Image (tube, rainbow, N blue to C red):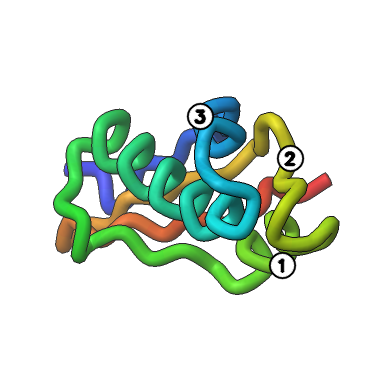
Amino acid sequence: MVDEEERVLTVPLRKAWDLPRTKRVPGAIKIIRTFVQRHMKAAAEDVWIDPRVNEELWARGIQKPPRRIRIKATKFEDNLVEVSLPEA
């Protein structure tokens, strides 16, 4: 059996812009978590988001998250999913 499964995903964050200005980045984090749950078939508590992804979302402040973000999702044998930025 394969030890880990790795995918590079592009997460659309357009729904975060429907939220109030001061809740856009926290909403974007929730959107990423649910997107990864759906595509990697994992539970919400099994998704771990790397702090560098968080820094990328917060780079322009709470009011202006990016419209989309590319992430690398790695699912391990124990169903934990790690979300990080793809290398270059």
Q: Position of residue 9 (x, y in %)?
A: 53, 30
Residue denoted by label 1: 55
> For the residue labelled by badge 3, is the local secondary structure a helix, a strand or a loop?
helix
Tell me the crowding category of disc 1: few under 14, some 14 to 19, or many 20 or more residues within 10 angstroms, Cα based. Answer: few
Q: In percent of the image, x 83 and y 45: which residue is there?
A: 88
Q: Can you see residue 85?
A: yes
Tell me the crowding category of disc 2: few under 14, some 14 to 19, or many 20 or more residues within 10 angstroms, Cα based. Answer: some
Residue 31: quadrant of the picture: top left
Q: Amino acid at mark 1?
A: Glu
Mark in the foreground, 3 or 1: 3
The numbered mark at residue 66 is 2
> For the residue labelled by badge 1, is the local secondary structure a helix, a strand or a loop?
helix
Residue denoted by label 3: 15
Q: In percent of the image, x 53 and y 31: which residue is there?
A: 18
Mark in the foreground, 3 or 2: 3
Q: Amino acid at mark 3?
A: Lys
Q: Earlier in the sequence, mark 1 or mark 2?
A: 1
